[in-house]
């Protein structure tokens, strides 16, 4: 039996973040191919952390900047190691390379952090993004991590295009693997059985907080046209500044963590997501399409999701967001068409069967041809020799200092 070791940035919380759901999808793919899986993490667990033992995944708590990891990974002796975000590869990649040189190293980006950082900078400075915004320290670190790994998973077609066309990363080092959908259940409440608007997103994620601020700005105009409507804002880890936006009279209600996304989506008529910036795919919009909930979002929110297909509602700029919210909320025909569009997007672009076999074939082929694959990755070899050594000795210095 082959062995996959996942080194996590955090313990997965699928009910709190899209990243948590994504991690469980990856675990499922490898388990279907008969892999034994061990999940390692140095972070503390929360009460909302998923119990990985319920899906037969072994877990171990590891120490950051500690040579005990060397012993741990040597004993585990994995065939494949998956790093959860580039920061984890920076911290543990050199140890994996030294102790398990024949293990296939995979980086799951979740989204391209440097892209999100560049867009955040442009947004907060109220200007258009320019190429120089990309070239940050985060960009250099993330790119180095990509080249040091044997394969990097990108979740968005847009990010795949950016990586290969703009930054000329060889396609052999990358794999497009989006969110994956199981079977769709079309037996959800109908238009007349639903009420109110909804928004959802982890409040610790800065783009989600900025989205809530955009909603607050739009809501008074929507409420004026639809006085009976409310906006229910859900999300884990509600901050104090978010709580201050709660206003019963205005119908702007900060609800906090949703115990069941399926249930709150089923009650709602329209999802509002005026996302100003970000990267990757938006889990809230993906789940909305799966669960038959039409949405209104921005071009940024819909990026990489619908291809040439019609959106699950409207993609709206700031000028007509309120108008589109009113139209989708009140027009049964438009709403039902939007719902069908969402189902079609899921069926044609995110169905699990479209990706799982090809992805696992890619993993198997890389394992069989690992030496040749690494020989062709010249930049990776250079970075292993140079930047990896600096990361290595910084970690050793921290460990010695802590003794």
Image: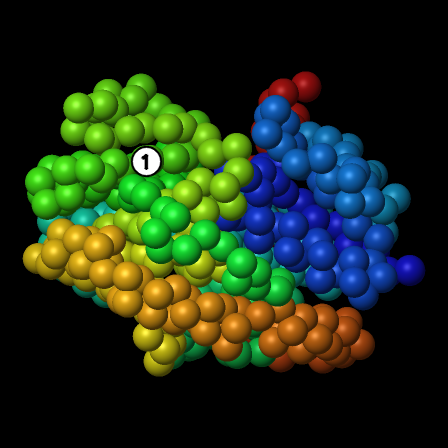
Which residue is pictured at 57% across the width and 57% down the height?
108
Query: Where is residue 55 shown, x and y percent of the image?
Result: 78, 45
> Secondary structure under badge 1?
strand
The one of 205 and 400 positioned closer to us in this rendering:
205
Other residues around mark 1 within 10 Å, as few (<14) / some (14–19) / many (≥20): many
Query: Where is residue 100 shown, x and y percent of the image?
Result: 79, 54
> Is 136 placed left or right of 31 in the picture?
left
- Would residue 63 be seen by someone viewing this image from the given angle? yes
Looking at the image, residue 379 lies above or below residue 196: below
The one of 307 and 266 positioned closer to us in this rendering:
266
Which residue is pictured at 62% across the width and 63% down the height?
182
Q: Quadrant of the N terminus?
A: bottom right
Residue 45 sits in which quadrant? top right
Kindly identify which residue carries mark 1: 232
Which residue is pictured at 17% across the width and 53% down the height?
326
Looking at the image, residue 216 lies above or below residue 323: above
Query: Where is residue 252 shown, x and y percent of the image?
Result: 23, 31
Disc count in the image? 1
> Is 372 placed left or right of 108 in the picture?
right
The one of 109 and 396 positioned closer to us in this rendering:
109
Q: Residue furthest right?
A: 1
Q: Quadrant of the C terminus?
A: top right
């Amino acid at each position: 039996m082959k062995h996959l070791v996942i080194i996590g940035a955090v313990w997965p919380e699928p009910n709190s973040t899209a990243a948590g759901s994504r991690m469980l999808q990856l675990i499922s793919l490898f388990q279907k191919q008969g892999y034994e899986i061990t999940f390692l993490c140095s972070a503390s667990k929360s009460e909302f952390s998923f119990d990985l033992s319920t899906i037969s995944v072994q877990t171990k708590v590891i120490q950051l900047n500690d040579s005990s990891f060397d012993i741990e990974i040597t004993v585990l002796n994995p065939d494949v190691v998956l790093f959860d975000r580039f920061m984890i590869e920076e911290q543990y990649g050199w140890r994996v390379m030294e102790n398990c040189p024949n293990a296939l190293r995979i980086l799951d980006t979740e989204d391209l952090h440097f892209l999100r950082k560049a867009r955040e900078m442009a947004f907060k400075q109220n200007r258009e993004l320019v190429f120089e915004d990309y070239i940050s320290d985060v960009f250099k670190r993330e790119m180095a991590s990509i080249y040091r790994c044997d394969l990097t998973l990108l979740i968005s077609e847009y990010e795949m295009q950016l990586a290969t066309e703009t930054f000329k990363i060889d396609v052999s080092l990358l794999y497009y693997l989006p969110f994956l959908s199981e079977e769709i259940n079309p037996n959800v409440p109908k238009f007349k059985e639903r009420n109110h608007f909804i928004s959802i997103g982890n409040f610790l994620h800065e783009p989600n907080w900025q989205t809530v601020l955009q909603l607050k700005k739009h809501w008074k105009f929507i409420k004026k046209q639809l006085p009976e409507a409310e906006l229910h804002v859900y999300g884990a880890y509600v901050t104090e500044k978010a709580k201050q936006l709660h206003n019963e009279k205005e119908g702007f209600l900060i609800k906090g963590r949703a115990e069941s996304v399926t249930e709150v989506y089923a009650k709602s008529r329209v999802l509002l997501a005026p996302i100003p910036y970000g990267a990757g795919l938006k889990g809230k919009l993906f789940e909305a399409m799966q669960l038959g909930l039409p949405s209104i979002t921005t071009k940024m929110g819909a990026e990489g999701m619908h291809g040439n297909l019609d959106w699950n509602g409207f993609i709206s700029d700031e000028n007509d967001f309120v108008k589109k919210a009113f139209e989708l909320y009140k027009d049964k025909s438009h709403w039902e068409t939007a719902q069908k569009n969402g189902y079609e997007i899921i069926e044609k672009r995110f169905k699990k069967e479209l990706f799982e076999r090809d992805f696992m074939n890619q993993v198997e082929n890389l394992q069989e041809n690992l030496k040749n694959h690494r020989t062709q990755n010249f930049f990776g070899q250079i970075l292993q020799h140079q930047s990896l050594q600096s990361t290595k000795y910084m970690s050793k210095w921290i460990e010695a200092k802590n003794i």
